[in-house]
Image: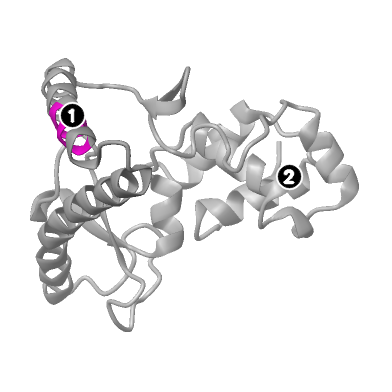
Amino acid sequence: MADVNGYRTIKALVLDFVHQCDGHVSYTALTEAVRRQFPTSRWKKSHWNYYRYQILRGRFRTMFSNDELTALSGTRPIPSGPRAPGSLGSQQEGALGWRPVPKDAEVKRIGDAILSNIRLVISLAAGDDIDKRFKLNRWVFSRLLQDENRVKRPIKWRLWESGIHACQACGEEFTSLKGVEIHRKDESRGYSLDNCELLCRECHQELD
């Protein structure tokens, strides 16, 4: 098993683990190493899929030799496409591509009803004009994102003003709020002061 001690981030651990294994990675051994070094991490298979994809086809590819890449690619085939499986969170593949997997039956029932009404209204408003339909979809989507951001911003400021000036995962110090991201500790709950923490972008990507 690869020696994995003293890493500040899960990314650093994973990349070095792949190097030490010469690309012949055991997911079980890697998981044990991650949980030993980062016991509070929510590490799961989709996180490894993301790193493996980035090593084989993405931004980490140049950090590895051809032999390492060949060995890694032989452990499990990577589907074609712009993103690794699981990189979009809890999803499943349907006839029209990736879609969310419902975790709350009541939320799904109500949410689907709301979506059906919204789609009907947009369809009636756009008619046969596909450009108008696209613009209306984007408008509604952007406004919903703005609503969420209005909730997140004051929580982010309050956490900062409470004295949290470092990433709560790796300890990297922040000099300002620029680049600092807010993370929900319990993904089943919404944004609230007690359910949020401040993370650097790298750690936020690893935990999501």
Q: Position of residue 161 (x, y in %)?
A: 12, 76
* 181 w.r.t. 136: above or below: below
Per the rendered image, the range of residues in magenta is: 117-122
Q: Main secondary structure of the magenta part?
A: helix
Q: Quadrant of the C terminus?
A: top left
Dividing the picture into quadrants, the one containing residue 113 is top left
Secondary structure at badge 1 equals: helix
Q: Is residue 131 visible?
A: yes
Amino acid carrying label 1: it is Leu
> Crowding near pointer 1: few (<14 within 10 Å), some, many (20+)?
few
| x, y percent for residue 166 | 31, 71
SS at badge 2: helix
Viewer-proximal residue among 32 and 71: 71
Applied colour scheme: one colour
Measured along the vertical axis of the image, is residue 121 above or below residue 197? above
Residue in the image at 86% along x and 38% along y = 70
Left or right position of 160 against 89: left
Measured Cα–Cα span from mark 2 to mark 1: 42 Å
Q: Nearer the viewer, residue 61 or 175?
A: 61
The circle on residue 120 is 1
Q: Is 192 positioned to the left or the right of 132 in the image?
A: left
Lower sequence index among marks 2 and 1:
2
How many marks overall? Answer: 2
Q: Kindly report which numbered mark, 2 or 1, lies closer to the viewer in this rendering.
A: 1
Q: Residue at x 36, y 76 (%)?
A: 173
> To which residue does mark 2 refer?
56
Q: Which residue is situated farthest in the bottom direction here?
A: 175
Image side of residue 197 versus residue 29, left or right: left
Q: Could you tell me which residue is drawn at 65 percent across and 40 percent down?
A: 52
Spot occupied by residue 148 in the image (x, y as percentages of width and height):
16, 53
